[in-house]
Image (cartoon, helix red, strand yellow):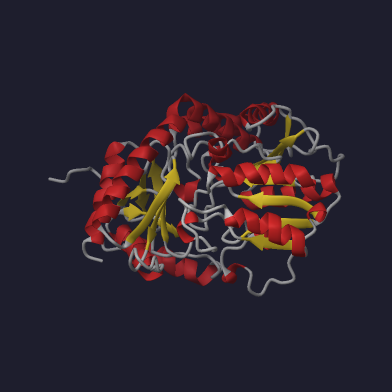
Amino acid sequence: MKKYPYPNIKTKLPGPRAAKIIETDDQFVSPSYTRGYPCVADTGRGVILTDIDGNEFLDFCAGIAVCSTGHCHPEIVEAIKTQAERLIHMSGTDFYYEVQARLAKKLNKLAPGRHRNRVFFTNSGAESIEAAIKLARYKTGRTRLIAYIGAFHGRTIGALSLTGSKIIQKQGFSPLLQGVTHIPYPYCYRCQFGQKRDCCKLECFQYLENILFQKTVPPTEVAAIFIEPIQGEGGYIVPPREYLVKLQKLAKKFGMLLVADEVQSGMGRTGKMFASEHFGFKPDIICTAKGIASGMPLGAIIATREIMDWPPGSHASTFGGNPIACAAALKTIELLEKGLMQNAAEMGEYLIGRLRQLKRKYSMIGDVRGLGLMIGMEIVIDRKSRAPDAKARDAIVDRAFYKGLILLGCGPNTIRFAPALIINKDHVDCCVEILEEILKNI
C-alpha cells in the first residue's frame, strides 16, 4: 500500500495527450522558453498538479513561487469570480476603483519601515524593476546603478541590464542600459574573496566601499543599489544580516536609494511578509510580484511618499492594478495573515531539517540554506572542493519529475524548494523520501 495518496503516475511520461500538446507547442511557441522536462499541466488543487493525461504530481515549485496559496485555492477562486462579475478592467492609471485603493492602503501598512508609502502597480516583477529604475533616477537626478553578480531582475531591457545571472539571458541584446556596475553578492558558501563565514571581515562589503566607490564608481553619481534580500535565481542565497545593515548605512551616507527586489522572496514566502524584515532592512523602494496574487498577473513597487512624488503622466500602466488581480491579492494577503505565513515559517524549518538530514548521508549535498519556504540545496561533486555539479543537479530534478515530484533548479547547481505555503509535514516527508530514493541511485 502506498504511504501517501500522491504522487500518482498512471502513464508513461509524457502521456499520449501530453505528447501531442508538446508537438504543437514545438511548432508554434517561441523556442526561447526553457522546459526542462515534459510537464503539461491541466488542473491544480492545493499542492497537487494534474497533467493532461491524469497523472498527479506533488508540486514543490508552485508556478515558480507564484501560487503562494496553492493551486486554485477556493477563496481565491471565489474572489476572482466575484470581482469578474462586477468589473474586469478600467485601467487604474486613468480611473479610480475601490479594490486598487484598498490594496494600495494594505501594502502601505505591510511594507517594512515607516507607513507613509505610495504604491505603483505593474503586471510583473520585471515591470516593477523597470518602474523602480525610473523612479530612482527621477528622484535622485543620478544615472548610475549598482546590482549584483548572480542577480536576476527580469528580461526587459532595464531589468536585464541589472541581471547578472546567465550569459544566455543577455547575449545578442546589447546595448543595454549604460552605467550599471555588478558587484559580488555576499555568498558565504562560495565567497569570491576566499574567506570562511566564521572568520571573514565582510570583504565583499569592503570591496564595494573601499575599492569600487574609491577607484571606479563615484558614489555621488549612483541613483540606487538593487539587491535581492535573498538571492533567488542565483541559488537561493541568504546573506549575512550585517551586510545589509552596513549597506543601508552606506547608501544613506551618499544619498543613494536602496531597492529591494522582493519579487520572489516577498509576500510571506520566508515566514515574514517581506524577506527584508529578517535583516532589519528598510529599503527605500520595494519591488514585488509573483506570490502577491496567487497566480494572477500583478506586481507593485512600494516607496515612501517623499520618494514617489513623480508627476501625473511620468509613469503609467494600462493593465497594472487590474481589478481582478487586486481582488486576488487582497484575498491572498488575508490568507497569509490568517496563518499561511506562519505555516511557511514552521514548515520551512521542518523542511530544512529534513534536507540537512539528507546532507549528512549524501556527500553530493554541499549546502542547505534558506528562510521559510525559500530553500536551496546545493549539489557538488564533493564537499572538500565544493565543485558545482550541474549535471547531477539536473539529473535529480529530471528524475524527480518522473517519480511525480515537481522541482526546479536555480543558480548553476542548486535545487530550489518553493512550494505553496499551505504544505504540511506529510508533503515534506513525501518530497524528501522521493529525493532520497533518487540520491541513492544517482
Could you say which quadrant of the image residue 172 lies in? bottom right
Residue 91 visible in the shown view: yes
Check the picture and name the quadrant holding the C terminus: bottom left
| Residue 43 place in picture, x, y as percent | 40, 47
Could you say which quadrant of the image residue 45 lies in? top left
Residue occupying image coordinates x 39% and y 65% = 386
Q: Answer left or right for 351 relative to 210.
A: left
Residue occupying image coordinates x 63% and y 73% = 171
Q: Is residue 362 above or below residue 69?
A: below
Check the picture and name the quadrant holding the N terminus: top left
Q: Is residue 326 above or below residue 402?
A: above
Residue 152 visible in the shown view: no
| Residue 339 place in picture, x, y as percent | 44, 27
Q: Answer left or right for 139 relative to 159.
A: right
User: Which residue is at the front of the view, 307 or 368?
Assistant: 368
Residue at the far left in the pictured view: 1
Residue occupying image coordinates x 62% and y 53% = 205
| Count of residue discs | 0
User: Which residue is at the front of the view, 166 or 79?
Assistant: 166
Q: Answer left or right for 268 relative to 305.
A: left
| Residue 271 place in picture, x, y as percent | 47, 35
Could you say which quadrant of the image residue 222 lies in? bottom right
| Residue 265 place in picture, x, y as percent | 53, 44
Residue at the far bottom in the pictured view: 172
Residue occupying image coordinates x 35% and y 65% = 384
User: Which residue is at the front of the view, 38 or 225?
Assistant: 225
Q: Is residue 386 above or below residue 41?
A: below
